[in-house]
């Protein structure tokens, strides 16, 4: 299957088609940024209203684990960038490996994050009416964890989706689909993955570090 | 100057009859067929939403309960708002006429991502299915604005409604992305940005709003869904949450959403006003740039919906001032359109009747918008029928009339047949008359203190309510007449010919109905758009 | 356009990505180490500054926005400006409201919903800039 080997008949050239696909993906990334925007705003509002709880809540989170998670995602981004690079030089095999490494980092991230969640479940640090954590009892304590779970939960859903995209692309690469004339899917799938990394680059300090 | 070009029969092979299997429609990637499918879906939505409106107006005929109870009344106005806003108005002009004509106006064979276009149709269907399911189970009673904490605690079926709108949002986003990329990358040879038809500028501006605003709605509905299901307290004061956070997030989308609803209509008016006045638009750049102006500045004004909600004075003041700015762009357009008509040779056909209605109602609706954007006045008018009348003037009086203008203007092009002009004018008169009768009393009611969304009211308001309900009935008959003659015209209408209006719009440089791939050979753009100083475009047909 | 024809270009791109990767890891460790030290408002500034630097590296190099001029840049920049717009007005509202309209409930201390009690210290719960 060579979806781009011949330009779709309604584009004036393959280069225009690639540009269109890229612009379409960037427009979609803009919508993803605005999707998370509201949650970041909610975080900032409640941080200023319940400063003490947010400071204590942040201290309670596992910053070391989060740092490892950050490193894992960055590694995935590097692998995906290299995979795109290899499609430009017709090396599908290496591209597949890069994409699979990216997918693996996604799964690793979700696993590590799952460990965090399990810890919070066990100690009762949960959103809203489920909050029973005895150590932080200041006003808005449950609100910190509400915002934490919503932000990281939405982000994790995107990591999952991104992982699926990378696996799909890896399968196509393993079949030798991509070339220096046909690489848009890897480029644009990679853009999505980098955005997921980008969002985490901000979640990490906001939730775990600034206490 | 005669309007008619050669009255040719519709070409033997066009996009409608090239393939006729059900599969060829359900799996089509032809932007024209997709436009027609959207037309059917939004007209159904208009009917359902309109039925809810009539049910509401019947209830309001008497001060006390007339035939339904209060909760049912709340459900009806909620569904009326949701269906009219999300299932009719927002998709109407972009998904029908934008899909059908954007590629043709650009000289392209299709939009940038035809399969995504088809996907957006099915996403609409799935979203509608969820909402229909919610209706059958009673529907939500929160109003289309879903304010918390009521919406997160009410027992009515909020969840499927939220999911339905959330899913529909993706349809909007995909359409917006598609159009933006199409305009950027698929313009024909010679077509610079300053040679784009003004309808394209309007659709482009609308698509930008759709892409930037809809995700915020998506998040807001998602959070509300989570709130309703698990009661985390994000928006619930009892748990330390801030209800105003919900309102900020909701209106950050919903105010630009009203520009999604009106801007395409303005594009239609720009196309039709120069055609029916036989004159070049007074200032192309004014209209083109003001479309972008509305798209961007419309985002800076959302807090004017929250003047009395507890928003800070600083924010209220800022939003009040910024709301004045966005009106400047609309005024520029109105002056340009009127200036275009002045000194022109008017052809008073049905689309022109709707243009007249549009201008009158846009100016009234817009001015009352400025009025309610004035904080001190809004304290009196907020949540009264004054606001209801204001937004219906814009949404029905302006946006819906622009849709009808476009429908009548482009009907011959889309289907190769003419509608009966006499009946067109009759229906337009009924609609304009009915509209005035429905909504002018509501301004008066609101000013006298009649609250919106109220099921009962004091006796002294009854006369005006009865007048409003009578107007609504007239409106219904007007729409019924339109529906009947358009359906009949599909089969029995006169063959329209390639350019029955003698328009200089680029989309008239195709056959009526257009060929499956729009053009025999790709057009070259060597003239300015809407240029009535040049002769009519000659359509080349295959011999 | 990132068409690769020469061996040199190939190595340059790969090297660029590798260096960016190393830079991102170094910045990650740096921000973690800084967070262990309490610098008051400085902590926030440093953490955000490093986050912005890291994201600039990802956007410009991994996402190739440095190479692709025009509309992709405009799309990304617009999204950021709109994010700032939403944030700005909402936070301005929260900080300039009549203070008693702000939520301040401690559901743990006072689970039953009643009028906000006078002894709840507003000062301790207001934001510090």
Image: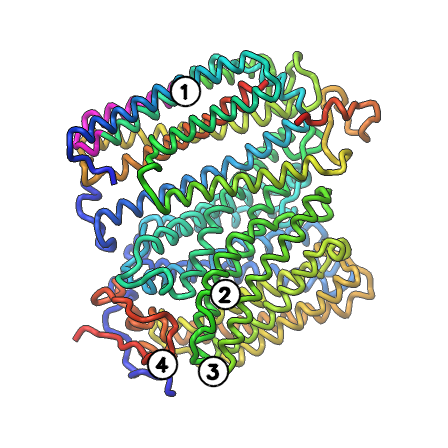
Distance from the alpha carbon under mark 4 to that under mark 3: 28 Å
Give me the C-alpha separation between circle 1 and circle 2.
49 Å
Circle number at residue B344? 3
Q: Which mark is residue B147?
A: none
**Looking at the image, is C101 positioned above or below residue B275?**
above
**Element under label 4?**
loop
Q: Is residue B171 above or below residue B542?
A: above
- Which span of residues is magenta-colored? A86-108
Residue B455 visible in rendering: no
Residue receiving disc 1: A109
Host chain of mark 3: B
Residue drawn where x is 25% and y is 55% of the image: A10
The Cα–Cα distance between marks 1 and 3, rounded to whole angstroms, is 67 Å
Between residues C11 and B249, which one lies in front from this camera angle? Answer: C11
Q: Residue furthest right?
A: C118
Marked residue chain, label 2: B
The circle drawn on residue B494 is 4
Which quadrant is the C terminus of chain A positioned in? Answer: top right
Q: Earlier in the sequence, mark 4 or mark 2?
A: 2
């Amino acid at each position: 299957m060579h979806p781009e080997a011949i330009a779709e008949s309604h584009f004036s050239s393959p280069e225009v088609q690639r540009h269109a696909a890229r612009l379409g993906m960037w427009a979609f990334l803009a919508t993803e940024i605005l999707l998370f925007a509201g949650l970041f705003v909610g975080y900032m509002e409640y941080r200023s209203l319940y400063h003490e709880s947010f400071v204590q809540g942040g201290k309670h989170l596992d910053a070391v684990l989060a740092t490892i998670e950050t490193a894992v995602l960055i590694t995935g981004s590097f692998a995906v960038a290299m995979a795109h690079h290899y499609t430009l030089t017709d090396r599908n095999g290496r591209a597949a490996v890069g994409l699979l490494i990216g997918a693996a980092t996604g799964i690793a991230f979700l696993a590590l994050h799952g460990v965090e969640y399990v810890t919070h479940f066990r100690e009762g640090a949960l959103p809203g009416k489920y909050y029973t954590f005895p150590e932080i009892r200041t006003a808005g304590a449950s609100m910190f964890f509400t915002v934490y779970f919503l932000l990281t939960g939405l982000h994790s859903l995107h990591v999952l989706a991104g992982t699926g995209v990378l696996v799909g692309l890896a399968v196509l690469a393993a079949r030798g689909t991509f070339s220096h004339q046909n690489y848009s899917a890897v480029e644009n799938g990679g853009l999505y993955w980098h955005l997921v990394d980008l969002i985490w680059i901000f979640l990490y300090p906001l939730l775990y570090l600034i206490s | 100057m005669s309007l008619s070009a050669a009255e040719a029969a519709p070409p033997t092979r066009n996009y409608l009859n090239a393939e006729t299997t059900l599969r060829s429609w359900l799996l089509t990637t032809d932007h024209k067929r997709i436009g027609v499918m959207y037309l059917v879906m939004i007209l159904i939505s208009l009917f359902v939403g309109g039925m809810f409106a009539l049910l509401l107006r019947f209830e309001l005929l008497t001060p006390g309960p007339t035939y339904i109870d209060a909760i049912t009344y709340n459900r009806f106005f909620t569904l009326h708002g949701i269906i009219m806003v999300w299932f009719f108005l927002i998709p109407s002009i972009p998904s029908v006429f934008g899909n059908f004509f954007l590629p043709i106006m650009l000289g392209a064979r299709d939009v940038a991502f035809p399969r995504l276009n088809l996907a957006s149709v099915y996403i609409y269907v799935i979203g509608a299915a969820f909402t229909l399911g919610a209706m059958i189970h009673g529907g939500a009673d929160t109003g289309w604005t879903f304010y918390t904490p009521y919406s997160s605690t009410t027992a009515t079926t909020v969840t499927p409604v939220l999911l339905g709108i959330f899913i529909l949002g993706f349809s909007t986003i995909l359409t917006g992305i598609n159009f933006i990329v199409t305009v950027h990358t698929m313009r024909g040879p010679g077509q610079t940005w300053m040679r784009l038809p003004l309808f394209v500028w309007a659709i482009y501006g609308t698509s930008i709003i759709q892409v930037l605003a809809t995700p915020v709605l998506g998040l807001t509905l998602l959070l509300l869904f989570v709130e309703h299901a698990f009661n985390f307290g994000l928006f619930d004061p009892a748990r330390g949450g801030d209800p105003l956070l919900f309102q900020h997030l909701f209106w950050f989308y919903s105010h630009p959403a009203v520009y999604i609803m009106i801007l395409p209509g303005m594009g239609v008016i720009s196309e039709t006003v120069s055609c029916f006045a036989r004159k070049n638009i007074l200032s192309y750049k004014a209209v083109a740039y003001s479309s972008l102006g509305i798209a961007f500045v419309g985002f800076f004004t959302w807090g004017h919906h929250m003047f009395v909600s507890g928003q800070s004075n600083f924010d209220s003041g800022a939003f009040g001032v910024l709301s004045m700015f966005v009106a400047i762009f609309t005024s520029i357009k109105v002056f340009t359109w009127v200036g275009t008509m002045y000194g022109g040779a008017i052809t008073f056909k049905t689309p022109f009747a709707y243009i007249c209605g549009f201008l009158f109602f846009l100016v009234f609706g817009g001015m009352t918008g400025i009025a309610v954007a004035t904080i001190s006045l809004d304290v009196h008018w907020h949540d009264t029928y004054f606001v209801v009348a204001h937004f219906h003037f814009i949404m029905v009086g302006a946006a819906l009339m622009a849709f009808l203008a476009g429908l009548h203007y482009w009907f011959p092009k889309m289907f190769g047949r003419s509608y009966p002009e006499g009946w067109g004018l009759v229906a337009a008169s009924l609609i304009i008359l009915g509209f005035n009768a429905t909504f002018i009393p509501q301004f008066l009611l609101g000013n006298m203190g009649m609250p919106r969304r109220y099921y009962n009211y004091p006796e002294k308001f009854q006369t005006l309510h009865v007048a409003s309900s009578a107007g609504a009935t007239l409106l219904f008959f007007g729409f019924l007449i339109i529906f009947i003659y358009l359906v009949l015209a599909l089969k029995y209408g006169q063959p329209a010919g390639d350019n029955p209006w003698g328009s200089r719009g680029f989309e008239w440089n195709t056959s009526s109905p257009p060929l499956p791939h729009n053009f025999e050979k790709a057009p070259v753009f060597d003239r300015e758009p809407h240029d009535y100083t040049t002769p009519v475009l000659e359509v080349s047909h295959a011999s | 356009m990132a068409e690769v024809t020469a061996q040199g270009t190939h190595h340059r791109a790969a090297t660029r990505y590798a260096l960016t990767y190393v830079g991102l890891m170094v910045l990650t460790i740096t921000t973690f180490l800084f967070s262990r030290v309490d610098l008051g408002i400085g902590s926030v500034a440093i953490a955000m500054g490093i986050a912005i630097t890291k994201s600039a590296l990802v956007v410009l190099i991994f996402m190739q926005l440095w190479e692709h001029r025009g509309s992709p840049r405009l799309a990304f920049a617009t999204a950021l400006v709109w994010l700032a717009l939403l944030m700005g007005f909402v936070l301005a509202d929260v900080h300039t409201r009549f203070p008693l309209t702000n939520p301040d409930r401690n559901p743990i201390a006072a689970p039953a919903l009643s009028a906000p009690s006078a002894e709840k210290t507003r000062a301790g719960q207001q934001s510090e800039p």
